[in-house]
């Protein structure tokens, strides 16, 4: 039974990728996608590529802040910002592309942070805190956007039942999200006991940790959405708030699908959330996002991992050589 469970979610992710590409094929059937998308990519000004790059740096800086917040919560202060940033960057660059970020992220973080003296229990707690911070960011931004513009879900009328896309339902869900944020903030400020729901438990962090989460959590999503915003054409661009809302919904759908990197799922949802922008221009912007947010970081992360493992191997070899030179104990 356990072996079947191990294959279940990868199969779900594969099915989501295949299904999304099938629907995308029908979306663009009869259009010269390659030629037009390449033309759209070349039409993006160098200035906008530059700002897309800055947005990428903002997103990964926020992710490094996630790790820093988790370490502060655990009382760990001896690890430098540079090491934390490199570890966080490598973790997310790999997990964003591979999928199953909790597990792949845990392996990378354990390999890195154990070299700094952290125990397996501490690393596991760090992974959970970082995952919760990301979830918290989605709740904060989702609550604000759905309360501010509940009509944005109507663009998904063909994909979701009408009861979910109705503005009243969307605003109600947004207010529930903001209510959750308010309870979390109040619980931290008032030092309340952990909130329990069955086997699920939320331990309220110290106020200084909570305040950091409140600012850091949405920052990564704001930066990642900025990549697409700057890559979209000025004509027909719906504005940053609309792009951020579409990104949040698309990214959430991609995570739920378990598709590696949200491949196909992210594009399908986002394109349908941008009906006023030519589809091939949206597709070009999404390719820029994949290049800046996924592919280039992945290539850099592989280099970082190779150098880290090489250094660890050299340390072991030097240690073994020095031990052999000293000879056996007498």
Image: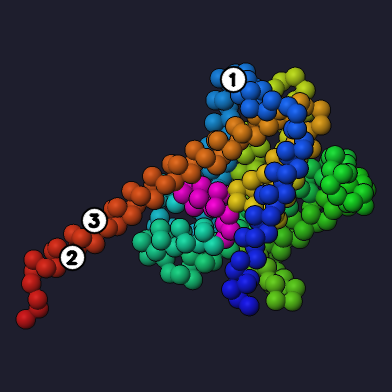
x 56%, y 19%: residue: 46
x 8%, y 66%: residue: 325
What is the quadrant of residue 144 in the picture? top right
x 59%, y 38%: residue: 290
Q: Which mark is residue 191?
A: none
Determine which residue is flagged by label 2.
320
Q: Judge from the rendering whether residue 279 lies leftward or rightward of residue 261; answer left or right.
A: right
The region drawn magenta spans 89-102
212 versus 53 height, above or below: below
Determine which residue is flagged by label 3.
314
x 75%, y 45%: residue: 249
Which of disc 1 and disc 3 is earlier in sequence? 1
Q: How many residues crowd around disc 3 within 10 Å: few (fewer than 14), some, or many (20 or more)?
A: few
Residue 101 in magenta?
yes
Which of disc 2 and disc 1 is earlier in sequence? 1
Q: Which mark is residue 42?
A: 1
Residue 181: x and y in percent read 74, 55
> Is residue 242 in sight in this rendering?
no
In this view, the residue in front, 53 or 274, is 274
């Amino acid at each position: 039974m356990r072996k079947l469970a191990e294959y279940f979610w990868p199969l779900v992710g594969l099915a989501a990728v295949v299904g999304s590409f099938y629907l995308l094929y029908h979306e663009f059937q009869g259009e010269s996608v390659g030629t037009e998308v390449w033309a759209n990519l070349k039409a993006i000004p160098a200035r906008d590529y530059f700002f897309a790059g800055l947005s990428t740096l903002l997103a990964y800086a926020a992710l490094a802040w996630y790790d820093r917040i988790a370490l502060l919560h655990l009382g760990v202060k001896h690890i430098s910002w540079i090491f934390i940033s490199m570890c966080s960057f490598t973790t997310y660059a790999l997990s964003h592309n591979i999928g199953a970020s909790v597990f792949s992220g845990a392996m990378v973080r354990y390999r890195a942070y154990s070299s700094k003296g952290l125990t397996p229990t501490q690393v596991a707690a760090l992974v959970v805190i970082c995952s919760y911070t990301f979830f918290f960011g989605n709740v904060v931004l989702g609550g604000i956007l759905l309360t501010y513009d509940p009509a944005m879900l109507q663009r998904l009328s063909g994909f979701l039942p009408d009861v979910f896309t109705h503005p009243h339902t969307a605003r109600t869900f947004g207010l529930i999200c903001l209510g959750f944020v308010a309870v979390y903030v109040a619980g931290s400020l008032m030092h309340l006991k952990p909130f329990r729901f069955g086997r699920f438990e939320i331990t309220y962090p110290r106020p200084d940790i909570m305040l950091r989460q409140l600012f850091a959590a949405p920052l990564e999503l704001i930066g990642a959405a900025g990549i697409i915003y700057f890559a979209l054409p000025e004509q027909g661009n719906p504005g940053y708030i609309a792009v951020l809302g579409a990104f949040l919904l698309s990214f959430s759908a991609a995570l739920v699908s378990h598709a590696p990197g949200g491949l196909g799922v992210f594009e399908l949802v986002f394109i349908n959330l941008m009906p006023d922008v030519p589809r091939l221009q949206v597709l070009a912007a999404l390719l820029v996002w994949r290049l800046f947010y996924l592919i280039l970081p992945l290539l850099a992360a592989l280099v970082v991992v190779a150098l880290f493992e090489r250094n660890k191997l050299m340390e072991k070899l030097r240690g073994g050589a020095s031990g052999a030179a000293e000879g056996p104990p007498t």
